[in-house]
Amino acid sequence: MKPTQQKQFDKASFQDSVKKHLSATYATTIETASERQWYLAMGRALAELTTFDLLATEADERIKKAKSVNYLSLEFLIGRLTGNNLISMGLYEQITEAMAELGHNLTDLLEEERDPSLGNGGLGRLAACFMDSCAAQEYPTVGYGLHYEYGLFKQSFKDGRQQEAPDAWSGVEGYPWEVARPELAQEIGFYGHVEVVSENGKEVRKWVPGMTVKAMPWDLPIVGYESNTVYPLRLWECKAIAPFSLASFNNGDYFEAQHALIDAGNITKVLYPNDNHEKGKTLRLMQQYFHSAASVRDILRRHEAAGYTLASLPKQETIQLNDTHPTIAIPELMRILMDEKGMSWDDAWAISSKTFAYTNHTLLPEALETWPESLIQRLLPRHMEIIFEINHRFLQEVRAMWPGDGEKQAKLSIIQEGFHRMVRMANLCVIGSYAVNGVAALHSQLVKKDLFPEFDAMYPTRLHNVTNGITPRRWLKFCNPGLSALITEKIGNEWPAKLEQLEGIAQFADDAEFQKEYMAVKKQNKQRLADWVSDNMGIELDTNAIFDVQIKRLHEYKRQHLDLLHVLALYHRLLKDPSFDMVPRVVFFAAKAAPGYHLAKEIIFAINKIAEKVNNDPRIGGKLKVVFIPDYRVSMAEIIIPAADVSQQISMAGKEASGTGNMKMALNGALTIGTMDGANVEIREEVGDDNIYIFGLDVDGVKRVKAAGYNPYDYYNADPLLKSSLDLLLGDEFTPGKPGLLRATYDSLLDGGDPYLCLADFASYVEAHEAMDAQYRDQAGWAKKAILNTALVGKFSSDRSIRDYVNNIWKLEAVSR
Ligand SMILES: *Cc1c(COP(=O)(O)O)cnc(C)c1O
């Protein structure tokens, strides 16, 4: 941060630039331009400023020569850029004024931006927070991703059921923040065969692709907070090579030539909408290779342009693999070093195996990627040879470590034997990387103990932990201006870059005046959300109610259906138990289900049907409301999170690797009700047991219950409240005249075996909610806990996560501009 280098902002020339873009770029006039065109013109005018700094950062000799991290991720869930970039550029107030003089309200203009939803959920959002923190701390960084034409689908509800629509995020006009970099385009091959040729008396293997496409990069500016550093998020778009196959065109084989064109257009057409679930589709592997190959080539181009030799690659570049999705980058680098640069296996491996690092994001078996050997063989024949060779050499190490132990070899081999042999991408990653990390302390411990114990024995220094984090710029300063101002009043304005300073407000946790101000901000944020719900959903909410929030992808392991069971229990008690009293509550859900995930969609349907009935039932006197906000996305999270009183983080222990929604809500003063899972464990360590509501089985408890032969009927039959709540799903209570429509959820929890132990945790969950209800009646006590949550979660800044990567894995240095 260099306040002395604060941008010289010239309001008049900025306004001229906006006007120029209105006419020259968007072919309209000041008189006739729509609100959207004003937003676009403003965006272009701002992007000119950041593009200047992007190119200056790129050209900076010290940065060219410094070690960089290359963050490879198939997903970057960046959310809207304009508001956030204004904060980083330190121009929020100036632009507000400049646009007001032109007759436009900045807040309204910002609403015109469509979220670039180039990710599914936590994994993609993490990548976005990491880019922000790398730039903020001026660590040389390039983010590499894909320029999907369609991001994550838009969600709406029809008769309570999820509908999906394509998300053309960049609009017909193009996204104002991106810049095309055609001079950095790459050519990427697929299919074909391997030839053996002799070069200088040496036998060299050469891949001859059967199809070639073009990778066209688009740069999005990642603006360092209050600095002039701008690093690129480089997104590759797949294009056909014009004039495609000239030979077949001239031969009159027009269709064949067109065919390649069609394939190329498809590769970056759409983001796969599965979160934590792999679906082994050919096009998905093509996306992965396209992304890896273009990125590795760009990294080598930069490295060589800086004047470095290939041998020094690990000294200059780290390639961080965000999950196994970019794993194919490992054999791709090996192939280039050997087949194109003429290196021996040993020399190539010495470089490659010190360049890659891998982040594991999940232990869920259905999320661990495997690809059919036959598919890789067909699509990438040379890469399959290299994978076999990596495996062959690795299995020699295994045999040396555990002589004669065939089981160990079978378990650790990159190749999973069977009728269809499969390539295990996680194994390839661990073998081909110099560092592997989990994303929260508990998760990393489980990676060591349960997922990769043998790898830990073979490579005892390879496994690390880096607990996830979130950027406090977007997730406090930008999304919660009221709380930000209150904090700044007390502790000054350095906290967005030094989040540990928030601890300074802990001393005001007992201060009655501060408690009042803090709760008044919360009330305003609740009103903002209530207004949104009223305007968009026609449901009226009371801001005196507890705002109880579960927002995340819909997944059985995250247990939205346990939350739903609690709603049913409250509803049942309100109707049947005259002595039951509760603080009014609004239970919020927001979640997208993967389009092919049947039960997840049934759970959405059940929540919507129950909401319809509960929200309009005069018998419960407005005590309970259920709101399922459609189309959950970053810009929606920015409205919901500051308004949350209760943060639901209720995954079955051992299943949520970290979570980051938990961090965002605690930072904004919501109290967590959660299991001992993921980063909840560390949030509890930071805020203290009194300021969090932990319930349910822990990892050992889950193992114990499962080992004993879990039967959900045991809990169902023993707990009358649980039975009554569940049974509400059976009749036509929520689907008048059509009993049984909500059976899918009921069945999964009983005859389906309740794989995520909702019933086992139900009683303890209800008890924790009761404790929160009792606490909320004491507003001063609640305020104290909320303030302490904000004060004590500084650890979860993604700036700290990035420093952990830098110090323990990347080993690089900041370059300030
Ligand atoms: C933070 C975030 C997530 C991750 O939420 P979890 O509760 O950690 O699963 C997913 N989607 C969006 C839009 C987010 O902002």
Image: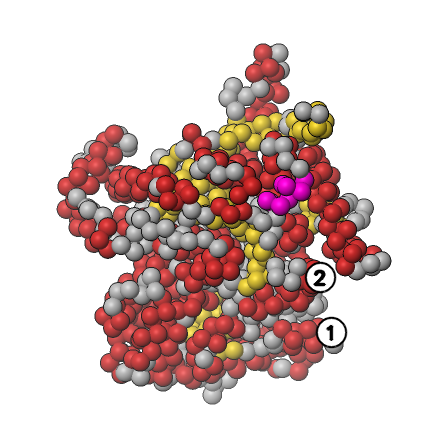
Please state which of residues 370 and 634 is positioned toward the viewer in this rendering: 370
| Label 2 crowd (10 A; few <14 / some 14-19 / many >=20) | some
Distance CA(mark 2)–CA(mark 1): 23 Å
**Disc 1: which residue:** 707
Nearest to N terminus: mark 2 or mark 1: 2
The picture quadrant where one finds residue 487 is bottom left
- Disc 2 residue type (three-letter): Glu
- Residue 615 appears anywhere in the view: no
- Disc 1 residue type (three-letter): Ala
Where are the magenta residues, as a range? 345-352
SS of the residue under disc 1: helix
The picture quadrant where one finds residue 756 is bottom right
Closer to viewer: mark 2 or mark 1? 2
Q: Where is residue 279 in the image (x, y as percent from the top left)?
A: 64, 48
State yes or no: residue 350 in magenta.
yes
Which residue: 69% across, 63% down? 457
497 relative position to 692: left or right: left
In the image, residue 280 sits, relative to residue 553, either above or below, namely above
